[in-house]
Image (cartoon, coloured by chain):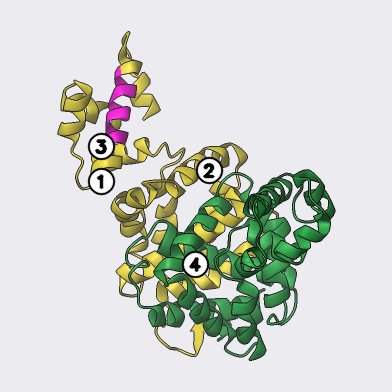
Chain colours: A green, B yellow
Amino acid sequence: MTSRASRGRRPGAPDTRAEVLAAARTSFAEKGFRGTTIRAVAASAGVDPALVHHYFGSKDDLFLAALEMPVDPRAILAPVVALGPDGAGERLLRTFLSVWDEPEIQVRLLAVARSALGDGGGRLLEDGFIPVVLGPVLGQLVKDRPEVRIPLVASQVLGLIVTRYVLALPPMAQMPAEDVVARIGPVLQHYLTGDLDGSPRIAR
Amino acid sequence: MTSRASRGRRPGAPDTRAEVLAAARTSFAEKGFRGTTIRAVAASAGVDPALVHHYFGSKDDLFLAALEMPVDPRAILAPVVALGPDGAGERLLRTFLSVWDEPEIQVRLLAVARSALGDGGGRLLEDGFIPVVLGPVLGQLVKDRPEVRIPLVASQVLGLIVTRYVLALPPMAQMPAEDVVARIGPVLQHYLTGDLDGSPRIAR
């Protein structure tokens, strides 16, 4: 996105881009992801819809830009998905940690996480982040019933984000990444492919 | 605590109680649980330490009162602990849900949860709630290494609180309690008594 915005920048363009982004943020917050259109965001910012596409790409891209995600989770998770469901819990967690444990990225992801935990954050996750990002990606890894399995994965990952990063609770904040992977990876695998309703043992 | 406060109440007493509580909250937030003493809280509120004990009981009790917990988690979790580690993951979750799913209690617990997720919340959990409440209770249920197992339990329980109550994400918010127990109970059991470092299968 930055490269699009800086390519062919003209006087005033950065302000236009910021205005589009502000209009997008307002619309996603008030109307949710589904209720937001590129056309309406463009109208609200007083620009042509083509300019919104030029700056931000698709509505999914605009949504991620509005969240101010420092990385594109779809690109990062693609290799995890490519290897299939076996061992996906551990791979998912290892990839997640490799991004979140990077201090410069962590600072920016923390801002996203804090805003997702605040007022209106539920709607952004429910109506945006989960269907736009987690659904398409994790949907390829679950055995069945994505509508139950993906939220269970989200519950443990959000709990990890809160304890390790937002609250920085010891020992979660200091736990070596490979220990986190060994301890929580099997849980994500259980949520992705395990027997959810009553099996006495859970295969990793 | 309410009965203590109302027993023998004299004109001005409710204000005194509120002043003690405000002083306690400030001290717990600024100095943590360990750095707070009944004596210093009393001095800060301009009352005798005996009055703090009279109103609130022990420092643990004062801490829970400062958190404005609508229930005493130690009393609620006692029967879960009494039955031992077998099946404790499911029992813990069933008990947790029976309290949190009660609308009048939930409203008040949500206020506690939101403040724990905000600035300084990490310190309250790290230096207070975990050692005062979770440590003594869950410590009786873990197989070994409570310093690792209890934070792992906390990570999944906090993730459940965030998704089911704070953000009220579907389908977590609507999931019948027994489904939550069946799906997440084995995970808590894994954290309490399972092989954390590399077992290929997790016993419930």
Mark 2 surroundings within 10 Å by alpha-carbon count, few (fewer than 14), some (14 through 19), many (20 or more)? some
Q: Where is residue B154 shown, x and y percent of the image?
A: 43, 61
The answer to which image quadrant residue B178 occupies is bottom right
Q: Residues within 10 Å of mark 1 (few under 14, many from 20)?
A: many
Amino acid carrying label 3: it is Ser
Q: Alpha-carbon distance for marks 1 and 3?
A: 8 Å
Which label was assigned to residue B27? 3
Q: Which mark is residue A19?
A: none
Secondary structure of the magenta portion, mostly? Answer: helix
Q: CA distance from mark 4 to mark 3?
A: 34 Å
Q: Nearer the viewer, mark 4 or mark 2?
A: 2
Ranked by sequence position, the earlier of labels 3 and 2 is 3
Q: Is residue A84 in view?
A: no
**Residue B20 lies in what quarter of the image?**
top left
Badge 1 or badge 4: first in the primary sequence: 1
Q: Which mark is residue B33?
A: 1
Q: Which residues are magenta?
A: B16-28
Tally of numbered tags: 4
Q: Is residue B181 left or right of residue A100?
A: right
Q: Say what amino acid the circle numbered 1 marks.
A: Phe
Residue wearing tag 2: B110
User: Of discs 4 and 3, which sits in the foreground?
Assistant: 3
Q: How far apart in space, not on screen, are marks 4 and 2 (Cα)?
A: 22 Å
Q: Are marks 1 and 2 on the same chain?
A: yes
Q: Amino acid at mark 4?
A: Gly
> Would you call the spot at circle 3 few (<14 residues within 10 Å), some (14-19), or many (20 or more)?
many
Mark 4 residue element? helix
Co-location on one chain, circles 4 and 3? yes
> Disc 3 vs disc 2: which is toward the camera?
3
